[in-house]
Amino acid sequence: MNVDLENTKVLLLGYTGYVGTTLAKVLLEKKVQIICPIRNKKNLEKKKNIVFVDISQIESFIETLIVKPTTIISCIASRKGGISDSWNVEYYLNKFFLDLSKRVGIKRFILISAICVQKPNLEFQKAKLAFEHLLQNSSLEYEIIRPTAFFKSLSGQIDRVKKGKSFLIFGNGELTSCKPISARDLSEFIIPLVTRSQSENKIHIIGGPGPPISPKRQAELLFELCKKEKKITHISPKLFLVITYALIPLSNFSIKIRDLREFLKIAYYYATESMLFWDEKIGSYSSNKTPEYGNESLEEYYKKILKNDVVYKELKDQKLF
Ligand SMILES: NC(=O)c1ccc[n+]([C@@H]2O[C@H](COP(=O)([O-])OP(=O)(O)OC[C@H]3O[C@@H](n4cnc5c(N)ncnc54)[C@H](OP(=O)(O)O)[C@@H]3O)[C@@H](O)[C@H]2O)c1
């Protein structure tokens, strides 16, 4: 039996982020009431059925409510990606809300994690995985979603191509692939997890509609859509490793250098690992075993961005990945 959406109240973490914004839109379309803890309330447009609360006041605010939220959905992520920020956000901030959920009686925690925690080499992945374990061993009902790459992560080079510059590719451009998913398709996937009367308490690996796409194919698609001459610059991913090793002696003395090494490791990871299901038995990624969901395509998304600068603003932070 499903819960009635109009009588559902959700605590949404990460409203100001890429997925959080779209998920809020989809929840509002379904008439769900949303409470969003926010760290900076400036410039937030008022919306019916959303209450924005200063994050530092969230517990006292929930205590005043007669009808409390039943579900928490976490879409938070470290904006900086450095070592301590990753742990502070991906682990400790999620843990704060897990503990708060227990105190105020929220019974279900839906976590947006990431497919890449299957092979955790990076600090943010280790922090995410540590929180996944904490959640799985807690008394709350849970759903852990591990999505593949978002469309925005495959859009960092649109501006270069528009300006007639070359597309930067690691190796031959076919070292990795993914089945990218749109923020709306991911949000639609989440809705039934909110409404079902009992959680499945499981991990959901999820990709967008196939077929998988490589960086080489992304480049071809963008040159076609921008009607620009195809120019590709090949870079060896080993370059990231060489600099990472060269920085080891300095990293003992500076947090900034340690973070810089972490960013280079992140770049190497994304240049060499696919965002697909990792098949432990055969020791490789499997496109066939990566579940597909939704129907929005990357090509249509690129077309929308190229036509419409408003959408393009969402991508202001995207660089290569
Ligand atoms: N990018 C991808 O391709 C990809 C793929 C798979 C999974 N994921 C995962 O999907 C989830 C959502 O990602 P996204 O791209 O939508 O994230 P995003 O756009 O980077 O947004 C991050 C959100 O977290 C909030 N946040 C960060 N640090 C905070 C802090 N110290 N205190 C309070 N709030 C803080 C941000 O608030 P402010 O606006 O105040 O900074 C923002 O609302 C993340 O778990 C991410 O790892 C991403």
Image (tube, grey):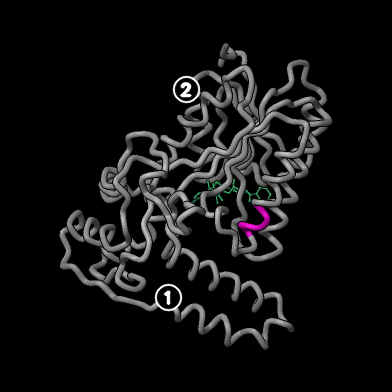
Whole-Å distance between the Cαs marked 1 and 2? 43 Å
Asked whether residue 80 is drawn in magenta, I would say no
Tag 2 or tag 1, which sits nearer the N-term?
Answer: 2
Q: Residue at x 56, y 70 (%)?
A: 263
Q: Which residue is mark 1?
A: 237
Q: Amino acid at mark 1?
A: Pro
Location of residue 254 (image quadrant): bottom right
List the single residue furthest toward the front: 281
Between circles 1 and 2, the one closer to the viewer is 1
SS at badge 1: loop
Q: Which residue is mark 2?
A: 29
Asked whether residue 179 appears in the rendered view, the answer is yes
Q: Which residues are magenta?
A: 124-128
Residue 85: give its label: none
Q: Residue at x 45, y 79 (%)?
A: 238
Quarter of the image with the N terminus in it: top right
Asked whether residue 310 appears in the rendered view, the answer is no
Left or right for 293, reference 244: left
Q: Residue at x 53, y 38 (%)?
A: 204
